[in-house]
Amino acid sequence: MHRFGVWAPKAEKVSLNWRNQTLPMNSPNSRGWWILDVAEAGCGDRYAFLLDDDPTCYPDPRGLRQPEGVHGPSELYDHSHFKWHDQLWRGSPKIGSVIYELHIGTYSTAGTFDGAIEHLQHLVDLGITHVEVMPVAAWAGKQGWGYDSVGLFATHEPYGGPDGFKRFVDACHAKGISVILDVVYNHFGPSGNYAIKFGPYLNTNRKTPWGDAVNLDEEGSDEVRRFFVDNALMWLKDYHCDGLRFDAVHAFLDLSAVHFMEQLSIEVERLSATLARDFHLIAESDLNDPRVVRSREANGYGMDSQWNDDFHHSLFALLYSPKEGEGGYYDDFGSIRDLHKSLKHAYVFDGQYSGYRKRRHGRPADGLSAHHFIHFDQNHDQVGNRAKGERLEHLIGLDAAKVALGLLLTAPFIPMLFMGEEWSTSAPFLYFANHEDEELRRQVAEGRQREFAAFGFDGDIPNPEEDETYEKSKLKWEEQSEGKHQEMLTWVKSLIKLRRSRVCFNDGDMHHLEVSSNEENQTLVMQRDEARVLINFGAKPQQFALLEGEVRELASRESIEERDNQLILPPMTLAVLLSSSEEVENRQVAQRPK
């Protein structure tokens, strides 16, 4: 026996297509749900729905499996059939996270969940606590970033389908790694979005960069919100994920008294209490609004943390000089002062005028722990949205890339690495897609060319729709033992090991952080109790006075001199110095007013 159900509030009649039969469904209830019990139906059966007099068979918007792709019929799938081995798993602590963002299709040669499992020991050896997996919900075509998902309850079949993802999560837990899944609730992809045939999932009166906004507050929005919340709970409950990263929450256009993010946090908290497991909710937000991560009790939305673009932009603009016309939002950044503020106050723009936006932007994040903010020196967007997918080291060189990672991994915020940067992989991360519709393929390729022609690129832009573009983006694991790749890997392992071994590097109290900088000399100093991080971003050597009892622990370059109680840092160099707790206390006592 299986109960088929679908929400189609505007339909006059709905039929089930099952085993070559067309079965009329019962009249809808007051909420617009059509139901039909079929005694002989079972796991593995394929089915679809017909609406009114439309002869097309449409897949279930809540279908758990799409074995023939998002345009084909749905397949009944039973979550209880998978045998898990993580019964004792409770997850890695959120506030001590070292996150690693990865894309399943390019993380391994195979481009599958099982292929990714083969490289999990590398993450253990590196010191990673959480993997943040780019979207795996089903989309049209084979390869893609995952942000064009349309079958939100199904797992992308070319990756290995639902059982494949469960094997991946199970294997991560066996290695002591938590899994955060990237989910997209702000839009549907351009191909295969059949949900809109069934109900008002979109609000045609409001627009986002992807088209019509998701309907979160108008007629029918209760069921639309239920659709997305149930999807979030499914990944946590049935796939054993340890958290979710919500894509572009600034595109949640919601005027409800209870914001959609607040509803998500409430219902995830209930599931957490029921399963006795902690979940990590991460928002991608460019609002610079601390309400996103404030608790609901403090009139916030209850997300645990957010991606903080301001740190990335201030660091990137300091290290790299964009070509004319390439700046965009980087035009708002570029000084040591910006980086200083992003370290001390999280947001650079917390109420100031933004030249890029042509308006004031943000509000202060006062009183929040640094653990509410996830910092990165690169991610899939910042790399893949470049014309040729260049990674940070490709643009600024090894010395500067080591400094960037050194700052990232010694700052008080939750650090996130983007796959392959730990060994400065030579592989780019390009924008790629695999749309089946020829007209859509042409539009995507031509649009990409036009976009970067405006930035002065010469037209040699990889075609996103070509298989070669996808293949070029796969990591080259064999590089790790070679030259600069080995040097960078050793450096990152040392930094993460240091972060794990010292309490001061995991202290999120911003009052315990002291930052000083010098715009003229291009230097920055970060004091974290017994640790002091010195950085010379400039083109000339710079001197830093050594404090009594300080010992150099790590340095991004070997050519550092100590002379007359001075540490001389070469250009583009970072050094970490350590003192004992007693020496720090003695200095603090000596600095007190008499």
Image (cartoon, helix red, strand yellow):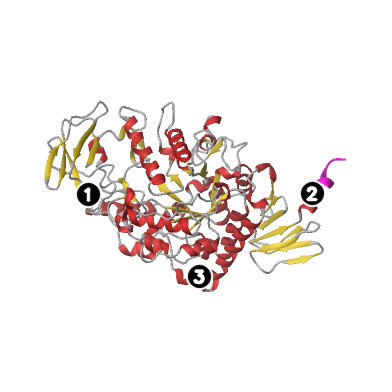
Residue depicted at 67% across the width and 63% down the height: 554
Query: Which quadrant of the view contains residue 571?
Result: bottom right
The residue lying furthest to the bottom in this view is 482
Looking at the rendered image, the quarter that the C terminus falls into is top right
Mark closest to the chain's N terminus, 2 or 3: 3
Mark closest to the chain's N terminus, 2 or 1: 1
Residue 89 appears in view: yes
Pointer 2 with pointer 3, Cβ within 8 A? no
Q: CA distance from mark 1 to mark 3?
A: 41 Å
Dot label at residue 480: 3
In the image, taking residue 451 as reference, residue 16 lies left or right, namely left
Residue kind at label 2, given as amino acid type: Glu
Write the start and end of the magenta stretch as one range. Answer: 587-594
Q: Nearer the viewer, mark 2 or mark 3?
A: 2
What residue would you read off at disc 2?
585
What residue would you read off at disc 1?
71
Looking at the rendered image, the quarter that the N terminus falls into is top left
Query: Which quadrant of the view contains residue 570?
Result: bottom right
Q: Residues within 10 Å of mark 2 (few under 14, many from 20)?
A: few
Mark closest to the chain's N terminus, 1 or 3: 1
Residue depicted at 69% across the width and 62% down the height: 553
Check residue 205 for magenta coloring: no
What x and y, as percent, mark residue 335?
61, 49
Determine whether the residue tagged by mark 2 lies in a helix, strand or loop. helix
Q: Residues within 10 Å of mark 1 (few under 14, many from 20)?
A: many
Residue kind at label 3, given as amino acid type: Gln
In the image, taking residue 321 as reference, residue 412 lies left or right, namely right
Determine whether the residue tagged by mark 1 lies in a helix, strand or loop. loop
Q: CA distance from mark 2 to mark 3?
A: 42 Å
Determine whether the residue tagged by mark 3 lies in a helix, strand or loop. helix
Q: Residues within 10 Å of mark 3 (few under 14, many from 20)?
A: some
